[in-house]
Amino acid sequence: MVARILMLTRDDDVPARHLGSMLTARGAEVVVFDPGGFPTSAKLSATLASDGTIRRRLVTADRAVDLETLTAVWFGRPSQPTPHPEVVDPIMRTYVRHESTAFADDLWSSLRYRAVPARAEVVRSAGHKLSQLVVASQVGFEIPPTLITTDPDELLDFYCTHDGKIVTKVIEQLSFHHQDEGFFRLTELVSTRDLGYANALRLCPVIVQPYVSKAFEVRVTVVGSRVFAVEIHSQASNRARLDWRSYDLHSTPHRVHRLPDAVAARCLRLVEQLGLCYGAIDLIVTPDGRYVFLEINPTGQYLWLEEATGLPISEALCDLLLGHDLVPAHASSREHAA
């Protein structure tokens, strides 16, 4: 049987394109589709007969896809459906976007296939920061004391409790753009000057945590029953010291990391408890050797880690999408060492 895999992600998702090429080389039929093209340049249909028989179909500019024949779907970073330019009224554009998104989400959820990292609704739930911190603690991770609030007084109390050594983080969106304007926000230290604007917190929630000292950071990529860990020596770069996502790759060494067995097992349990079969976990290793959990990204990027270390993460993802690694996530097979 030929594997037929649909990759739902943005057109500019380079790792997904790389993965799709590898899957094609292994004999799979791969369709990469960004739901942002629906309904403007692509068509989706679902036909349900009175006996319950259903037929679902995707039509793009260059092909028609019988969605009943899919064997797996990769949920990457898809865009939201975009109303056709002919719909110019702002209210109607909002309505069309809502209706199109509701139908597309329902259609993907109704399909019976192998979903990586999981079905869309599970991926969304797993991305919730408060919930994942609770689960991480339950499976045995050390987590930083955390405040998520719109109450300025709570922020000031937290600041005093931790001697002013705290950071703030966004809840979900690192970046946001509207027309030609936007912002990009990573982890930031809270200064005494920032406290003068604490009252603005009532307008939007934020995550607040104590600053955790770092020896280095570890990015753990869980793929099915396999665990790949990479040291990110962010403290070697002034630019990346506070948040390695500032990306100073030339000055930030990346090395394969040997996770302690207990920590690797926690990573597997966390992914399993969140209903995923893939996840990118960020940990801090403190100067005294403790592993502190920061977050898990259900659709986190990995390709730069593979290129820096040679770890076969893409091959493991191909195995998972092709059904060659269906061992439960709590299995003992691990590849957290070179």
Image: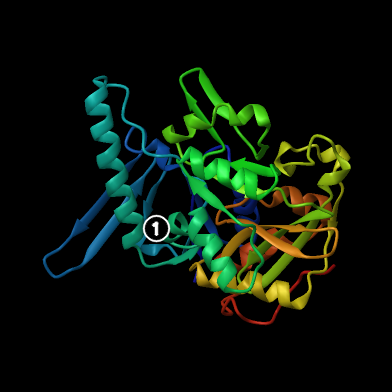
For the residue pair 296 and 6, the one nearer the viewer reads as 296
Q: Tell me what residue is drawn at x 82 percent, y 63 percent.
A: 257
For the residue pair 24 and 257, the one nearer the viewer reads as 257
Q: Position of residue 99 (x, y in %)?
A: 25, 41
For the residue pair 143 and 172, the one nearer the viewer reads as 143
Residue at the far bottom in the pictured view: 332
Q: Is residue 177 left or right of residue 260?
A: left
Q: Please determine whether, in this image, residue 147 is positioned above or below residue 243.
A: below
Is residue 58 at least partly visible in the picture? yes
Residue labelled with disc 1: 121
Element carrying mark 1: helix
Q: Position of residue 106 (x, y in %)?
A: 30, 54
Amino acid type at mark 1: Glu
Q: Tell me what residue is drawn at x 51 percent, y 19 percent.
A: 181
Q: Position of residue 152 (x, y in %)?
A: 49, 38
Q: Is residue 304 left or right of residue 96?
A: right
Q: Tell me what residue is drawn at x 43 percent, y 35 percent.
A: 202
What is the quadrant of residue 284 in the picture? Answer: bottom right
Label total for image: 1
Is residue 5 at least partly visible in the picture? no
Residue at the far top in the pictured view: 180
Q: Quadrant of the C terminus?
A: bottom right
Query: How many C-alpha atoms fall within 10 Å of the one at disc 1: few (<14), some, or many (≥20)?
Result: few
Q: Position of residue 41 (x, y in %)?
A: 37, 34
Q: Please determine whether, in this image, residue 52 is positioned above or below residue 209.
A: below
For the residue pair 150 and 236, the one nearer the viewer reads as 150
Residue at the far left in the pictured view: 50
Q: Please determine whether, in this image, residue 58 is positioned above or below residue 251.
A: below
